[in-house]
Amino acid sequence: MTDALEKRLKELPSRPGCYRFLAEDGRVLYVGKATHLRSRVRSYFSPDGPRGRSRWVERMMPLVADVEFMVTTSPLEALLLENTLIKQHRPPFNSRLTDDKHYPYICLTWTDEFPRLVVVRRVKQDGNQYFGPYTNSKAMHRTLNLVRRLFGICTSKPTARRPDGACLQYHIGYCSGVCAGVISQEEYRANLRQAARFLRGQTDDVVRELRDGMQAASQEMQYEKAAELRDRLQAIEETIQRQVVVDTDLGEHDAIGIAMPPEGEDTATVAVQFIRAGRLTDQRHFTVRQASERALGELVGEFLTQYYDQASLVPKEVLVPAEPPDRELLEDWLQVKRGSKVSVHHPLRGDKKRLVEMAIENAELAAKQATEAAHAEAERGRARMESLMEALRLSALPRRIECYDISTLHGKESVGSMVVFEDGMPAPSQYRLFRIREDAGKADDYAMLHEVLQRRVLRSLSDDEFGGEPDLLVIDGGKGQLNAALAALGEIGTSYSVISLAKRNEEVFVPGRASPVILSDRSPALQLLMHIRDEAHRFAITFHRKRRGKAVIRSLLDEIPGVGPKRKQALLERFPTVGALCQATVDDLASVPGVSSNLAAEIHRRLKTPGTGSARREDRAPVPSGEWIDVGDESD
């Protein structure tokens, strides 16, 4: 232990908070929480470690060069801060849900005049109601379509409705007709409240309400309404009958099952089964990284924190396969999210134990299926590489293949992409993007490709930023692009195996051969080349459209008096796409720093003028997050 680290440990307060272990280069290794920072952090440096030294702690501690801490007002606040810091730093010694991806939710837009059910990726505190997350997108859309039809939910925005006010779904019998004035808003919102209960799994309440409503309508001789409620009731009862009754106490539980990673692997599989009113209504699977050297209870606690941080519904009871170390703290946090008491329970006998065992069995089956699928993908990738090696007469198996593509529009906002496949499969973390310097060939694809390849090779000579040397370079294009690539590499004195793939007839051009190589459509080699070429094209054009969209915004804003460089930059940061800017209201524009209400009204008027930005369609697909971009020298 260094003197600086020993001094830092002496400064630790006896307060709740979060701590971060740092490597020598400042990288965050681990984030933790503590009710008592001083005793918790110092325990890592004792021979036994915190609550018995785990293997991952033994691997981490020799790398720790410093520790930082943040004091909080309560242990609950420390738990929330820990989750935020893990997402921010992604420490290698913290377990986390794979990719931290944003799973889809079903959102009930109560704030709209005619609320709808829509699919979103993020939960917001905006007065709307969210259901999810759903890990199976197809199952989510089946549920969404079923609920829309059962409860007659309108699907279109007011601006998309027909001249008579009614949406298309009403004309084909799926919308209850609130948009056409057939039913009142209060009746429509009553239907929505039933739909919300149905999505929460409270189907018995919905059935009871529909049955009472049907009988009341029949007694009042409103036979058409009674028949409509009868049909809806029958459809819901058929859906309920397909759900399996697993719990006799008709409780509301989430049962958690975990399949720990086998020896030599790092990823655990978690199954979450949803029991509502005693019925198994749904199941979702997750994978957790950095799980191999953790105790089961520790992993349970970390999963619950990350999962329920993004879940839209917290049940009354969470059934777990092992008790987490901070069970009481977790219960307090879940109670705040739910608004009523929540129990985290490790059952040792009875029906609840069987629910957890069923969840564990499903987790193990999901892990087995994932392993088999991964092995099948690996075999498929190897078969493709061997086919490609044979077809192109390569001297070695092309384990790392890089593909390059250029995307431009008359030489403006030009970009180049580098896509990497390893062992026949995409390696997205190694994808790279290059902004082409505007004076590099204008609309000359050959000059732009020449620049990209030279920048890639020269950078790899000075450092290992690109993750390794390629076994094969694939160029999107024909013989001209191939010759440009060879010339660029030759000027540097570097030699790689290079080919090009022309899209028109899928012809493969190889150096030294006058005629192209024609591969069978069913050839695994051609399938691999087409896959990587299409991926490079997608990656390049996505970034190009994003840059082009920002250029369009700049040109639109340049035409508006009063919008100088600082205000333009502020608007670009707030509204990064043409669509976002053109859809902004006057209030949205006025909320940007430096934009007055009068200027916001002028910007809004200009953008809504026919022939300007509102009439332009711009692809708003985002560049994948976390990707490295070689910006080169901005002065160029």
Image (cartoon, rainbow, N blue to C red):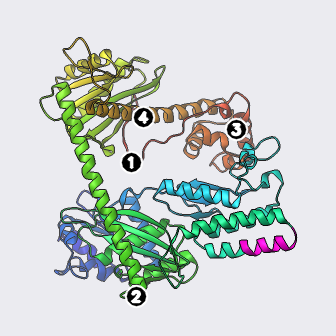
Q: Earlier in the sequence, mark 1 or mark 2?
A: 2
**According to the image, label 3 marks what residue?**
603
Whether pointer 4 and pointer 2 mark residues with C-beta atoms closer than 8 Å, the reply is no
Helix, strand or loop under label 4: helix
Disc 3 to disc 1, C-alpha distance: 33 Å
User: Which label was assigned to residue 538?
Assistant: 4
Amino acid type at image mark 4: Arg
In terms of sequence position, does the residue under pointer 4 or pointer 2 come before the other? 2
Give the residue pinned by disc 1. 626
Q: Quadrant of residue 541?
A: top left
Q: Amino acid at mark 1?
A: Gly
In percent of width and height, residue 94 lies at: 31, 66
Name the amino acid, label 2.
Gly
| Horizontal and vertical percent position of residue 299 | 32, 73
> Cα distance, mark 4 to mark 2?
54 Å
**Residue at mark 3 to residue at mark 2: CA–CA distance:** 66 Å
Instruction: Write down the region rendered in magenta.
Output: 210-221
Q: Is residue 467 visible?
A: no
Screen quadrant of the N terminus: bottom left
Looking at the rendered image, the disc whose residue lies closer to the viewer, 4 or 3, is 4
- Magenta residue check for 458: no
Badge 1 local density, few (<14 within 10 Å), some, or many (20+)? few
Is label 1 in contact with label 2 (beta carbons under 8 Å)? no
- Residue labelled with disc 2: 350
Q: Residue 246: give x, y in percent of width and height.
A: 47, 78
Res 575 → quadrant: top right
Mark 3–mark 2 CB contact (< 8 Å): no
